[in-house]
Amino acid sequence: MTNLQAFILDLDGVITDTAEYHFQAWKRLAEEEGIVFTRADNEQLRGVSRRRSLELLLGERLGGYTEAQMQEMMARKNRYYVKMLEVITPDDFLPGAQELLEEIKRRGFKVAIGSASKNTRTVLARLGILDFFDAISDGHTVTVAKPAPDVFLYAANAMGISPEACAVVEDAQAGVEAALAAQMIAIGVGPEERVGAAHYRYDSTADIDLDEILRG
């Protein structure tokens, strides 16, 4: 794959795992609204925007809330989540994530973040890698979330790289769909049933084989 020039990585579930914090924040909100919210329900929120997550959480009750109430609930959940982020340190890289980032850079590729989260920069700062990336595309830079390709296309454009020369590392079905829609190489991290549509699939970030990907 001689034309590959850049890697775009999702944040949650690829570099660090804040899924538990998201779950606890959504669960607290759900309980306050009298809604049962389980870990299985939380899986449906993986990789999608905050608003879409709230819509899925509310389900059949969605029509009973005003826009102002929706905005308040999203802000409330985010307050809970941001408070939990205060415990993140550079020790919270997922296994193999820091090594993967360093290897990508060592091989001369550009590297960007492509995340739906509006707290991306906060998490990267807590991990000590905010200045590591050539571009950061997140919930503040695009308005249409995954599975739309916008977040990855923004990252490619910010790096000055054509989409076809980018590879995306994702742990969510919506993210893999977004990468494919962007005409990028999709590298899935996780089980077959979730990321099996990717060009390459690995059980974890630590298992990613750059040599295999570069051979095409």
Image: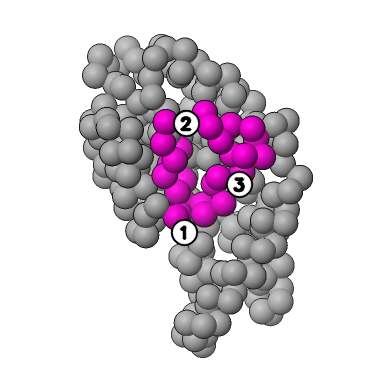
Real-space Cα distance between discs 1 and 3?
17 Å
Mark 3 vs 2: CB contact within 8 A:
no
Which mark is drawn over residue 133? 2
Q: Front-most of 6 and 196?
A: 6
Q: Over which residues does the magenta segment extend?
A: 113-140
> Which residue was labeled with disc 3?
122
Real-space Cα distance between discs 1 and 2?
22 Å
* Badge 1 element: loop
The answer to which of marks 1 and 3 sits earlier in the sequence is 1
Instruction: Let me know if residue 70 is in the magenta part.
Output: no
- Evaluate whether residue 34 shows in this view: yes
- Residue 144's spot in the image, x, y percent? 35, 58
> Which residue was labeled with disc 1?
49
Which mark is drawn over residue 74? none
In this view, 91 is above or below 75: above
Q: Which amino acid does label 2 sit on?
A: Phe
Q: What residue type is labelled 3?
A: Thr
